[in-house]
Image (cartoon, rainbow, N blue to C red):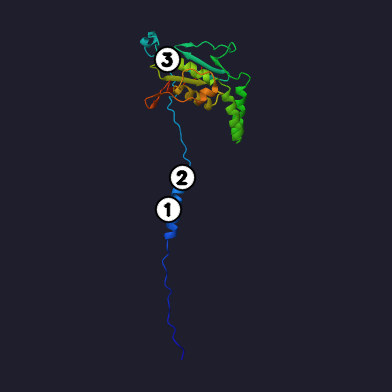
Amino acid sequence: MARNKRDSTDEVKELDLTPIMNMVVILIPLLLLSMVFLEVGVINITAPKLSVGPSTPTEIEEPDKKLNLTVAVGAKGFEIGATGAILPQKAGCPVPGPTICLLKQNVDVAAKFQRSRELLSAGNIAEGEVLMKEALEAYNWVELYNSIARIKNEYKDETVIKISADPDVPYAAIVRVMDVTRFRLEKDTYSKSSEFWTAGYKKVGSQQEELFPDPVLAVAQ
């Protein structure tokens, strides 16, 4: 007579998740510490506006008493205008030319900008950025800051600066103009580029002292 076998069922053991939870608790802080946070700087600007001219005779007869500071960026340097007139050229600049000529006058800035755009469009980011940097370094940023600081000392209540550029000038140059003219540094005048680029900002209390913090993009004419 065959012996009846009893059906036996294996007991299902519960998984021990403690080691996994311990590992997760350790990994989360490590992942957070290894993250790189990207800082995004934002500059509030005003876009250019087109106008058909004054709408009333009063606006025509009333003189413009504002500074109306304008910086135009071209392939030959910076042209600075204020109160309806263009500031005279700095000593040593070729005539005719902009108010502040290039620091490195032997550099073909327009050609470098053009070649940089071509390389960036083709995906050659590294070489394109090198050419862009070389073109930007040809400008006399130190003299631009010195001039803007002197103007600010005479027009302390003005905060608006209009910025325009030639069509072939990249936006990177316009952004750097905003950076240079936005805050006052430790000194109002610099003679060496190395001293200028390493200088700290002048503080008013806990805030950085401003030069012209309200940029307006203007249409070059």
Which residue is situated farthest in the top direction here? 61
Look at mark 3 in the image and give the residue it sits on.
153
Residue 167: % across, % down = 55, 23
Comes first in the chain, label 1 or label 2: 1
**What's the amino acid at mark 2?**
Leu
In this rendering, does residue 142 appear at all?
Answer: yes
Looking at the image, residue 142 lies above or below residue 64: below
Residue at image location 42% in from the left, 15% down from the top: 153
Comes first in the chain, label 3 or label 1: 1
Looking at the image, residue 35 lies above or below residue 61: below
What is the distance, in whole Å, between disc 1 and disc 2 at their CAs? 13 Å
Please rate how many residues cluster around mark 2, counting C-alpha atoms within 10 Å: few if below 14, some from 14 to 19, many from 20.
few
Of the numbered discs in the image, which one, if any, rests on residue 25? 1
Residue 178: % across, % down = 47, 24
Please rate how many residues cluster around mark 3, counting C-alpha atoms within 10 Å: few if below 14, some from 14 to 19, many from 20.
few
Look at mark 2 in the image and give the residue it sits on.
33
> Between residues 147 and 64, which one lies in front from this camera angle?
147
**What's the amino acid at mark 3?**
Asn
In this rendering, does residue 220 appear at all?
Answer: no
**What's the amino acid at mark 1?**
Val
Comes first in the chain, label 3 or label 2: 2
Residue 41: % across, % down = 45, 32
Residue at image location 39% in from the left, 26% down from the top: 207
Helix, strand or loop at mark 2: helix
Q: Mark 3 touching mark 1, by CB under 8 A?
A: no
What is the distance, in whole Å, between disc 3 and disc 1 at their CAs? 57 Å
Residue 18: % across, % down = 42, 60
Image quadrant in which you'd find residue 48: top left
